Image: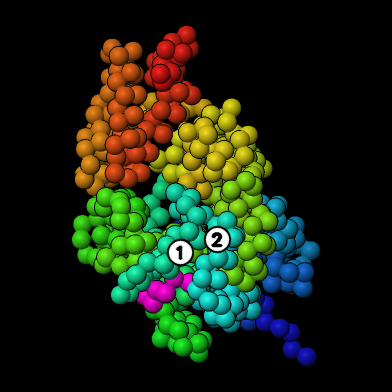
Amino acid sequence: MSQPIPTLYVPRDAAALAVGADELAQAIAAEAARRGQAVRIVRNGSRGLLWLEPLVEVQTPRGRVAYGPVQVQDVPGLFEADWLQDGPAAARHRLAQGPTEAIPYLKNQERLTFARVGVTDPLSLDDYQAHGGLQGLRRALEMAPAAIVEEVVQSGLRGRGGAAFPAGIKWKTVLAAAGQRKYVVCNADEGDSGTFSDRLLMEGDPYVLIEGMAIAGLATGATQGYVYVRSEYPHAIATLRQAIALATQAGWLGPDILGSGRGFTLQVRVGAGAYICGEETSLLESLEGKRGMVRAKPPLPAVQGLFGQPTVVNNVITLASVPIILAQGHAAYRDYGMGRSRGTLPFQLAGNIKQGGLVEKAFGLTLRELLYDYGGGSASGRPLRAVQVGGPLGAYLPESQWDIPLDYEAYAAVSAMIGHGGLVAFDDTVDMSHMARYAMTFCAVESCGKCTPCRIGSTRGAEVIDRIRDGREREQNVALLRDLCDTMLGGSLCALGGMTPYPVLSALEHFPEDFGIPATARASAQPA
């Protein structure tokens, strides 16, 4: 009886490609051929353990066994160690990580949205269905639109792009709105620093996003969808386009979804890289072929969105969370989390962190757990000092706030936000006055220019911080900076200008010494 052909998994994710995954796959195939050994190489998505990329997995009788980070020069030695047969020497190899599912970083997660990422071939229709795909769509096809919406409402799912608005309420508004045509738009313009969950999912499990968008269409009466992806994600764009074509051929999309008589079509649109186009109304302007500038609200996009029609605008992770809610029921999803923050969120660990990667966990864990239990502390070996949570508009949290549960309301109570779940860690060498200035200059560069508080306030803000750092009339300029931040918070049209004060004020509040403010003067720097 012939032996089964060994199967190896080598990620095709952009993070793995950046450290040589393509060359590694070629080297494995070449070494196997040189030894007369037939192998099957599957290009999967990334498991999210980015410090171990390229992470190669070998299918064995005890499950998939991981090795990483594997370089081309390591390949002959791994074959010598009999890694294809899970030999004793392979288990002792310096790159051996043991059974993939038993790696603590992965084992201790609650993977709902990312359940298939890194497990399946991202473009295999059969793989997707074999691992629970399409169950949510099939159930949705048997339900009335209002019932689908109610399932999402009851799940407690909130927007994962940053605003945390209840997804079901937005869908309910679109369903009730009158329009000649309705749309579903996926905001895949992932531009926040330290974030990569959208990209990992689009490259590693594109069908879950497609399924989620189709369900959103069925729920709201929308028949056309667009995925708006930033141009800096070429691999995600290519994967999505291939997946949409295959899903359409299979009847998962098109005028007659799975023979139901109900239709939904989907297209990819590529943004030019403007950060402001991550704001939903700027994104819609860009989709319409205009310059990406913020629209005044009301009207809300749910009432007058794309081309003036009712439009669902949700982030990638929000839409990709929908299939499991429909497949398993709202209660199963709602069981995860705490308070009004239900379900899970893929947290992304970046910056000065030893074990960077993606960690999908239920709401309620702490920043300290993420930084040390998963991240392993700083990459530099120095003490961690500050963490920015929620992208470039998020607050800088000092160690005294690392034990606050990761919950939307708990973070809002300390003038912070969870946002898209991105974490950027800094060790004790960071100059927080420099980071505060960076927040203002980032806003100045990325502003669409429509409103004065953002366009002018950010430029003046950087100038005021320079004067504080230089010691020029420091007390007066600190007061001026706080007054300027208050104007930006209350007067900006969108979150870019409205939230830039968060990192600035948090740096000033928690790290006054970096601005040259002595501890005794800290009380006088408090807001009135």
Q: Residue 265 is drawn in which quadrant? A: bottom left
Please indicate whether residue 239 sits to the left or right of residue 475 in the image. right
Q: Is residue 202 above or below residue 490?
A: below
Residue 62: x and y, percent? Answer: 77, 69
Q: Residue 49, image x and y in percent?
A: 59, 55
Q: Could you say where residue 64 lies in the image, as x and y percent from the top left?
A: 70, 68
- Foreground of the two, 178 or 187: 178
* Residue found 31% across the figure and 24% down from its top: 483
User: Which segment did they paint magenta?
Assistant: 219-224
| Residue found 34% across the figure and 35% down from its top | 489
In the picture provided, is 314 more to the left or to the right than 492? right
Query: Residue at coordinates 63% horizontally, 64% vertically from top-left?
Result: 330
| Residue where numbered disc 2 is placed | 153
Crowd band around label 2 with a 10 angstrom C-alpha radius: few (<14), some (14–19), many (20+): some
Label 2 and label 1: CA atoms lie apart by 9 Å
Front residue of this view, candidates 92 and 333: 333
Quadrant of the frame with the N terminus: bottom right
Q: Residues within 10 Å of mark 1 (few under 14, many from 20)?
A: many
Q: Which quadrant of the figure has residue 96?
A: bottom right
> At label 2, which amino acid type do we have?
Val
**Placement of 206 over or under 478, stated as above or below:** below
Which residue carries the number 1 mark? 171
- Type of the residue with mark 1: Trp
User: Disc 2, disc 1: CB below 8 Å?
Assistant: yes
